[in-house]
DNA sequence: GACTTTTATATGTCTGACAATTGATTTTGA
DNA sequence: TCAAAATCAATTGTCAGACATATAAAAGTC
């Protein structure tokens, strides 16, 4: 194995790695119960606290879940989409906040990926997806809405767009791209005028998807991208001058 | 806070969550040193092993790193792209293997996202990216190459395509989509004939990118998607008949 | 037979200790 | 005086053993 040849890191990291490999390789199938902590300690010839640290590492990645009691133990977790979403979003958010990614770069990536969904979404979106978009647009046009709520609604709108493609793998991949942008978006305080324009573009997107016109949706998304970047630029310039 | 209102899970999970929140909120900046385990134990009114379990959870997500010795301790980690890639790939791989995702769905998502890169990649790809693609194509055309090596080279080719867009956020997002497919792709044993066709399509893609012709690259990718799905279908049908 | 109690087994947590690592400090020696 | 060596102190890594707690199954009771 790779790990045994280069035993790196703590014992708990090594043990976690070896169990992780077993799960990924399929040696441990979903819902299989791992040996008890005491047994693992014996197998790996370490103490129970060390085993526990290893198990916590795996639990942090949602690879296992633990249960107390007589028939308890550690079980290989069925990694579900919501868990994967959450991880993706955390990682993406931190990645953006720690790597001096320009808003332009992040926007470019986000909208490029989102446009990858439009063709499918135009074809397959359900009435539910359209209704969600309309509802979020309505919320966005309410005066007195806080910037945070506006951004949250924006995310919900775009998620509906992505989910319209009816491809869960794609929804998962996009979750990180869309949601991780929210902190960056929150930095842009939206004027009434800019909100109006954004909602108008959302309207164009929703109309195009309803008409199953992917080309128009693409164009509106592209315009929204340009507008978002120009808004961000204004805010940053204003700050620089201060 | 959300966590304090609904204290969920183990103590170690709660502590990990509260430190994680502090990192995400920016209260703890990169390279900041956390209090020592003993001090954290005192602050949270738990024992050191419990604190350690919490820290291991964070370490598993690459949020902190630890260092032994006099000036050691736990430090907020600068989350770098490779770390984020690795996490994304692990999560994506498990997600695909555990959720009965059809090869068609996974392929659709992957190629749709990849096509999102072609326009940028056609515009910006460097000579290095083109050289990498050519080199991988050469490797792929060598007879006697194992299926695993062929797939690995395939991944390398497509990563070069994605990296050509010169947008690190996009490369990160695509890493999961492309690499997580490898186990699925490994299931398809490639005949000499099918390899030949794949390499030919790779050639079309590389040529189009070199000529900065995104449309042709898109078309070749679409053809590759259709061909990949048809190959997978053949393999699955053959298995079903057995 | 249905309900209650007991019991066994597992994880969750604590205490206290020692080993290993490593930067800083002090001592030593030329 | 300055550099090398020895020592120190702080911190994480690991261990052993114990108790608390949760939970399902088994045993007991009416």
Image: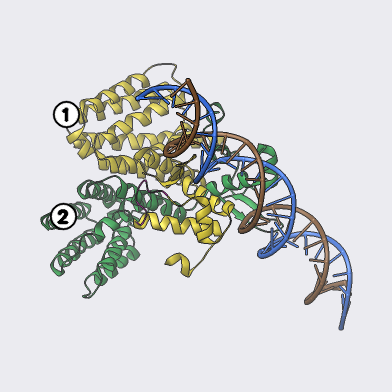
Chain colours: A yellow, B green, C blue, D brown
Decide if residue C9 is on the left or right side of residue A211: right
Q: Main secondary structure of the magenta part?
A: loop
Q: Position of residue A59 (x, y in %)?
A: 47, 46
> Which of the 4 quarters of the picture holds residue B153?
bottom left
Q: Position of residue A242 (x, y in %)?
A: 57, 34
Is residue B76 shown to the viewer in this render? yes
At a point 31% along the width and 39% down the height, the residue shown is A171
Q: Secondary structure at mark 2?
A: helix
Residue beneath label 2, please? B236
Q: Which residues are magenta?
A: A27-33
* Residue nearest the viewer, comparing B132 with A19: A19
Q: Residues within 10 Å of mark 2 (few under 14, many from 20)?
A: some
Q: Is residue A32 magenta?
A: yes
Q: CA distance from mark 1 to mark 2?
A: 36 Å
Residue beneath label 1, please? A211
Front: mark 1 or 2: 2
At a point 18% along the width and 61% down the height, the residue shown is B201
Is residue B19 shown to the viewer in this render? no
Q: Quadrant of the N terminus of chain A?
A: bottom left
Residue under mark 2: which chain is it in? B
* Residue nearest the viewer, comparing C5 with A186: C5
Q: Residues within 10 Å of mark 1 (few under 14, many from 20)?
A: few
């Amino acid at each position: 194995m790779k790990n045994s040849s280069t035993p790196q890191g703590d014992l708990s990291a090594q043990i976690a790695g070896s169990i992780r490999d077993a799960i990924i390789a399929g040696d441990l199938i979903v819902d299989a119960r791992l040996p008890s902590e005491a047994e693992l300690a014996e197998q790996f010839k370490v103490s129970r606290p060390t085993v526990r640290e290893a198990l916590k590492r795996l639990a942090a990645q949602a690879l296992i879940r633990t249960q107390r009691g007589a028939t308890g133990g550690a079980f290989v977790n069925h990694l579900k989409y919501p868990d994967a979403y959450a991880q993706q979003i955390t990682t993406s958010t931190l990645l953006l906040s720690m790597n001096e990614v320009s808003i332009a770069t992040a926007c470019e990536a986000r909208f490029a990926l989102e446009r990858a969904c439009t063709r499918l979404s135009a074809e397959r979106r359900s009435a539910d997806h359209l209704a969600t978009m309309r509802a979020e647009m309505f919320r966005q046009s309410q005066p007195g809405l806080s910037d945070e709520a506006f951004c949250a609604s924006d995310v919900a709108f775009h998620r509906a767009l992505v989910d319209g493609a009816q491809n869960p793998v794609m929804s998962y991949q996009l979750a990180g791209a869309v949601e991780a942008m929210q902190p960056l978006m929150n930095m842009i305080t939206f004027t009434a005028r800019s909100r109006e324009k954004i909602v108008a573009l959302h309207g164009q997107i929703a109309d195009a998807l309803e008409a199953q016109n992917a080309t128009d949706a693409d164009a509106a998304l592209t315009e929204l991208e340009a507008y978002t970047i120009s808004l961000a630029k204004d805010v940053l310039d204003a700050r620089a001058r201060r």
